Amino acid sequence: MKILNIFPITVPLLAVLLLAACTDQSQEQSQEQSNEQSAAEDPALLAREALDQAQAQYDASRQAGHVWARTPVLLKSATEALAAGDFSGAISAADQATRLADASLTQAQAEQTAWLHRFPKMP
Amino acid sequence: MFNGKEFTTIRRSAIAAMLLALSSYSLLGYMAIFSHQAVADPEADRQAMRTFYQKRFPDVAPEAHKDGVYAFDENAREQWLELEDFPPYEIAIDEGQELFATPLADGGNYSDCFGDGAVKNRFPYFDEQQGEVITLELAINTCRDQHGDQPLPYNGAEITRLTAYIAFQSRGQTIAVAVANEGALAAYNDGKRFYASRRGQLNFACTSCHVQLAGNRLRAEYLSASLGHVSHWPAYRLKWQDVGSLHQRFARCIKQVGAEPFPPQSKEYRNLEYFLTYISNGLPLNGPSIRK
């Protein structure tokens, strides 16, 4: 009986809450999209992203014990370029560092078994 | 006997069975080779290396590789022998002798740990308790620590002068490294893997030059054999204009192939030294020496 009494209030209330939640979600989504768009357009953020990626790949190659000498040099250049506001220079150096670190990781992977065949064997 | 459809089915089954048998055979063969290579047998490795270099350098006795390229490059050997008349490492030996006798923080000195200094053939060894390879440089710093002194930097002049003196005192001793337990075998295998792994942007392994191409020229220089690579350190390098350590030489090699070197006395280099020293078992110690 009591349920029936509150029914006329509950239904509109739930509807309003649902509407508010949906509106909020769509606002959040549009905010996220707008953030992503601005990130895609912001060279500083793009440079930061490229540098983070290069750093992560460098760390992985260090973990594998196969760091190539040029990688940290390029990482340093990218960091310095970013600090100096040269975003395109930072992205270029960071991308090169990423490519080198990727290649050194491929080398580390290949060497896991390839090394076994490089020693003379007893006839 | 069979109609066309049955014959095709039988033929397909036979081909499938043959392929299966072949692939199983290949897999078994591969596993046999792989497991044989993966399980390290240091003595078999050493013998295989000696046999390989005997074939590569038929006129050079295995023991002669203690002199590196001077074992087979006549011109370089002559120049080296002339330099040995007044060796540039002599000052390092004298300074090392002085440091050896200098009191440490608690009044003791290195002779408490190393006697008269003729101890180089005891190193490197695998310490089961510590679970790692102990080199002479590590032992020097342990000795300093036991006497309440600060450790020496591994790429510094002081430790190299001390090892130059100890190497001089140990001349003529025979290299006799043991791989006596599981931990030692793992360290040996780690060093072996390091030696044969391609690294750096030039994609070279130590074996590329010192096994596959040993005896060939790289620009104007002959490439030496792996045998004897550890016998003569520390060495006075004309390029450095100073006496330097084996690990400094490792670092230079690693850098030359475009890889980032490891620090001296890192686990990687100590295991590499352990492997290379085992391979040179039976050769006399003849450090310090002179190299280009």
Image (tube, coloured by chain):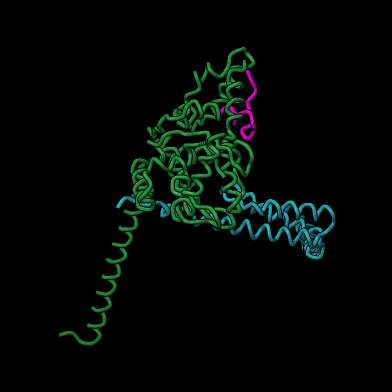
Q: Is residue B3 above or below residue B31?
A: below
Q: Is residue A23 visible?
A: no
Residue A77 is left or right of residue B22, and the answer is right
Chain coloured green: B
Give whichever of B150, B213 is nearer the camera.
B213
* Left or right position of A46 against B128: right
The image position of residue B81, as x and y in percent, is 50, 40
Q: Is residue B284 visible?
A: yes
Residue drawn where x is 45% and y is 52% of the image: B214
Classify the position of the N terminus of chain A by image quarter.
bottom right
- Direction right: furthest residue: A85
Task: Report the magenta residues as a range.
Answer: B148-163
Question: Whole-percent x and y of residue A59?
Answer: 64, 49
* Above or below: residue B261 compared with residue B270: below
Is B42 a magenta residue? no
Nearest the viewer among B58 and B55 is: B58
Position of B114 with respect to A17 (left or right) is: left
Residue at the limit of the structure toward the bottom, as seen here: B4
Q: Observer-nearest residue: A93 or A31?
A: A93
Which residue is drawn at the image coordinates 29% and 72% (left, top)? B16
x and y percentages locating residue A71 in the rendered image: 66, 54
Pinpoint residue B124: horizontal percent, then vertical percent: 47, 32
Position of B256 compared to B224: left or right? right
Q: Colour of chain A?
A: cyan
Q: Residue at x 39, y 32 (%)?
A: B176
Q: Is residue A115 above or below residue B65?
A: below
